[in-house]
Image (tube, helix red, strand yellow):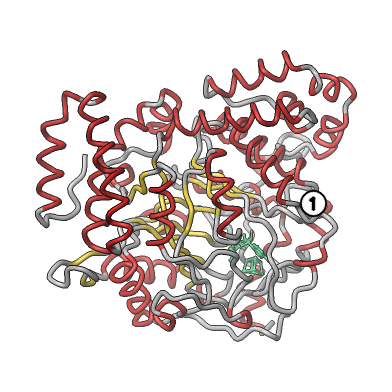
């Protein structure tokens, strides 16, 4: 590391923004020892074999209540296949009750691939000389938006930054502003313009002051994954000499985000670094801590699974690699233990597996994803990966059109709605409507309007034909479910079909 980079790195972690959250003994909210004990406790294991007990716990999830750690350990220890099948059905029912049959799509956009950290599993780690790196210029960012918004039809992005002085808060502000301000012409209707309407951020933990600046440029959800909640493993994978080596700086970044006024926060764990059951418990403890302290749980939970990366042996040799079956169980228990947040399944997973996991409660997925720097413009949205230019290798390179069509065939409506965030339905306010199911019904109106918009602007004829069937069925349902606003809906819908854009409730 150069002297300038190392002095920047040494100032990243601010102990005063962590210590106030620790308890009197300096402990945090992840009790490693008791999680390990709970997962192997004899009483828990016998409860996991008791169908009545397991069904009682599932009934609590179905009532959209967060489970306790003990209840979650019971579910994680279930061995009966019939009970697992019931738990999967319940996970899907919860999703339907909270979010209805809507699914949201987004694209990841890597803005920088420089990084001062040395996470052992990541292709972008500083010590990996096999990767060619860079930082997009603002013109290059506009070029990416032309493809993402203008050709593919994305309305939401998650922008990703490595931790580096070249892509610090000043760069983040400029790039996010550039993304929102870039208006591009639309593929099927060159006479209309569109833009990205929601920018989520996945970046290193930041200070409260930096997070306030991110909020001010209109960031959507702030996502930071703890990677592993297991402290010993965390220490082994993240050198102490780097900012990421500080477990507590990362663990409390959502506390700082909420302090900064950002109330949509996304937590996650990278599955495959340590025991998957421990990570599910870690996510639960994190959600409980945020709920208890701030009255706001996580807006989303992510569960990326370790993928191969250039010159990165750990990514393929981890002894904690998670099988497809274990992954499926992890997703099911996450949905049951924290029933209200969005759940994100990414294109790290292959198309077939993604299809088989969607019904377990997934609410968001990426599509047309390209994670090389500047890759969207270079590839113009086509299937394109270059392992020496990206963090890891994706499993599903299908286009957004393909993914939307598959969802429509499965009975899901892809929602391009970003209204909730733009009219303040976030944080604590949205928590109540999620728990009562009100959000699902309300958002359906916007889902139908934005789906109409997307079908006209971007869909291939084949996808459009299948999409029309979904729209027709949804309109019939809305007539019955929301009679009071149905006339206004019909007005917005026909104006959208006639070419007006961005109408929402
Ligand atoms: N540099 C920021 C950070 O570490 O928080 C930005 C996020 S990083 C670019 C996005 C996420 O990718 C990481 O938090 C990690 O969970 C995940 N990731 C890293 N290496 C991976 C790999 N080999 N396979 C799958 N996911 C990986
Ligand atoms: Fe850097 Fe993030 Fe990769 Fe770690 S996971 S090396 S912080 S880009």
Question: Percent x, y for residue 495?
Answer: 10, 48
Q: Which residue is mark 1?
A: 274
Q: Give the position of the N terminus as an image quadrant.
A: bottom right
Is 416 on the left-hand or right-hand side of 48? left
Number of marks present in the image shown: 1
Is 363 on the left-hand or right-hand side of 74? left
Is 302 on the left-hand or right-hand side of 146? right
Question: Percent x, y for residue 461?
Answer: 27, 62
Secondary structure beneath disc 1? loop
> For residue 186, which quarter of the picture?
bottom left
Check disc 1: other Cα within 10 Å, few if <14, some if 14-19, many if 20+. many
**Nearer-the-camera pick, 25 or 465:** 465
Q: Give the position of the C terminus as an image quadrant.
A: top left
Q: Quadrant of ligand 1?
A: bottom right
Question: Percent x, y for residue 411?
Answer: 40, 41
Residue at 37%, 57% in the rendered image = 156
**Nearer-the-camera pick, 176 or 350:** 350
Is 145 on the left-hand or right-hand side of 374? left
Tell me if I can see residue 320 in this picture: yes
């Amino acid at each position: 590391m150069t002297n300038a980079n190392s002095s920047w790195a040494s100032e990243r972690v601010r102990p005063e923004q962590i210590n106030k959250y620790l308890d009197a003994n300096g402990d945090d909210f992840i009790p490693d020892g008791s999680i390990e004990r709970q997962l192997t406790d004899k009483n828990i294991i016998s409860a996991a074999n008791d169908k009545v007990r397991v069904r009682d716990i599932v009934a609590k999830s179905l009532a959209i209540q967060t489970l306790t750690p003990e209840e979650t350990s019971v579910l994680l220890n279930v061995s009966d296949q019939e009970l697992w099948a019931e738990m999967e059905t319940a996970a899907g029912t919860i999703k339907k009750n909270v979010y209805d049959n809507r699914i949201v799509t987004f694209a990841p956009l890597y803005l920088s691939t420089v990084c001062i950290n040395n996470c052992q599993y990541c292709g972008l780690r500083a010590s990996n000389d096999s990767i060619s790196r860079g930082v997009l210029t603002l013109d290059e960012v506009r070029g990416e938006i032309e493809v993402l918004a203008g050709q593919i039809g994305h309305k939401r992005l998650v922008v990703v930054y490595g931790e580096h002085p070249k892509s610090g808060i000043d760069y983040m502000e400029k790039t996010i502003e550039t993304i929102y301000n870039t208006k591009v012409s639309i593929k099927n209707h060159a006479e209309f313009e569109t833009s990205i309407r929601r920018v989520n951020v996945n970046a290193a933990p930041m200070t409260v002051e930096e997070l306030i600046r991110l909020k001010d440029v209109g960031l959507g959800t702030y996502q930071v994954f703890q990677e592993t909640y297991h402290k010993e493993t965390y220490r082994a994978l993240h050198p102490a000499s780097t900012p990421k080596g500080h477990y507590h700086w990362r663990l409390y970044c959502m506390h700082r985000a909420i302090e900064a006024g950002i109330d949509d926060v996304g937590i996650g764990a990278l599955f495959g670094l340590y025991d998957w059951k421990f990570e599910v418990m870690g996510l639960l403890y994190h959600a409980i801590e945020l709920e208890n302290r701030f009255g706001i749980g996580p807006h989303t939970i992510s569960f990326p699974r370790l993928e191969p990366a250039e010159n990165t042996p750990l990514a393929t040799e981890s002894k904690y690699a998670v099988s497809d079956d274990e992954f499926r169980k992890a997703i099911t228990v996450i949905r049951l233990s924290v029933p209200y947040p969005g759940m994100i399944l990414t294109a790290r997973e292959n198309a077939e597996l993604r299809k088989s996991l969607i019904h377990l409660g997934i609410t968001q997925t990426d599509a047309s994803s390209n994670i090389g720097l500047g890759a969207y413009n270079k590839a113009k949205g086509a299937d394109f990966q270059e392992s020496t230019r990206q963090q890891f290798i994706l499993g599903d390179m299908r286009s957004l059109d393909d993914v939307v069509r598959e969802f429509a065939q499965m009975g899901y409506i892809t929602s391009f709605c970003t209204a909730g965030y733009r009219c303040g339905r976030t944080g604590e306010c949205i928590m109540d409507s999620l728990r009562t199911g009100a959000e699902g019904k309300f958002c359906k109106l916007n889902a139908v309007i934005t789906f109409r918009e997307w079908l006209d602007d971007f869909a291939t004829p084949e996808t459009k034909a299948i999409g029309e069937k979904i729209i027709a069925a949804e309109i019939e349902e809305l007539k019955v479910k929301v009679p009071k606003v149905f006339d206004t809906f019909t007005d917005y819908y026909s104006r959208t079909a006639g070419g007006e854009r961005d109408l929402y409730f």
